[in-house]
Image: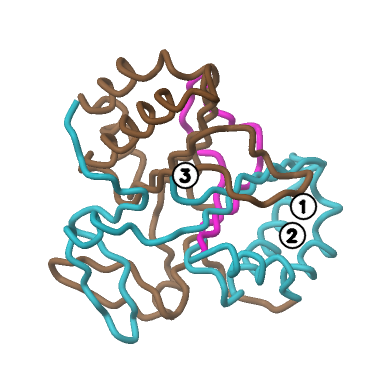
Chain colours: A cyan, B brown
Amino acid sequence: MKKVSRRSFLEKSSMVLASAAAITAIPASAQAAQAPSMFVHHVYFWLKNPSSKPDHAKLLKGLQSLTSIEAIKTSHIGVPADTNRPVIEKSYQFSLLLIFNNRQDQDTYQTHPTHLKFVEDCSNLWTKVIVYDSVNA
Amino acid sequence: MKKVSRRSFLEKSSMVLASAAAITAIPASAQAAQAPSMFVHHVYFWLKNPSSKPDHAKLLKGLQSLTSIEAIKTSHIGVPADTNRPVIEKSYQFSLLLIFNNRQDQDTYQTHPTHLKFVEDCSNLWTKVIVYDSVNA
């Protein structure tokens, strides 16, 4: 097996996360030496009425409202891809991937008024939610 | 609820994905108008012997080998965070988040020799794997 240095979070050699205000290219070697701390929060939603287009639209709108929360570094609102293998779980209707710099930012998000409003407005739409929180290995 | 424009993939206003070779800042307004296509592949691993440090180390090394595959845009190797709520699934030992530009790149990854070698070397270590593949909502 090809050996690579430990990189818990890797932006491929041609890609770096950079500030739009003051873009800084981080050499790949520096990234490999010290991976930035990340808090990865991935939530999967199962709707009570998965065939209801209005419920899909309402949850999507609610999820979109969350992405305005400042503590979030990166977000992705997803739906199941068209891949099919036995190990793939694709019975959910929406996924929400949020990446934070650290646990503290995630905690800020959890109690943010916009998040609390989302839960208040949308929690009646889902029957199940699974959350996976992970930090650098 | 605060209304925001549809942004399936959002790099917060201060953050953009940029090429280290030729850094390009994408105005936030442009991102909001057209979110880049993303294929998010998130895998969770449950070890056969979760208390075995050698097994942890071997799987971690295997996961690290995967991040060298060129088709991957962004990766994160994780372990469960120390968050605790009923909806949080934290019985797994490792997570692997891989972000691709599209389904084709993910397919390239699946059949890449380094990935096949990883499965050959490490699949005996785990008892369960769950994969969530998601694309822009």
Residue indicated by mark 3: B78
Residue sitting farthest toward the bottom: A21
> Label 3: chain?
B
Would you name the residue on which mark 1 appears?
Answer: A55
Tag nearer the camera, 3 or 2: 3
Q: Relative to A20, is A43 on the left or the right?
A: right
**Residue on which the image places disc 2:** A58
Kindly check if marks 1 and 2 are in contact, taking CB atoms under 8 A apart as contact: yes
- Locate the N terminus of chain A by quadrant: top left
In the shown orientation, is residue B27 left or right of residue A78?
left
Q: Is residue B61 above or below residue A95?
A: above
Tell me the distance, in whole angstroms, between the alpha carbons under discs 1 and 3: 32 Å
Q: Which amino acid is tagged 2? A: Lys
Chain under callout 2: A
- Asked whether A51 falls inside the magenta stretch, the response is no
Residue sitting at x 59%, y 75%: A68
Whether A85 is among the magenta residues is yes
Where residue A24 sits: x, y (%)? 24, 77
Type of amino acid at the residue the image marks with label 1: Asp
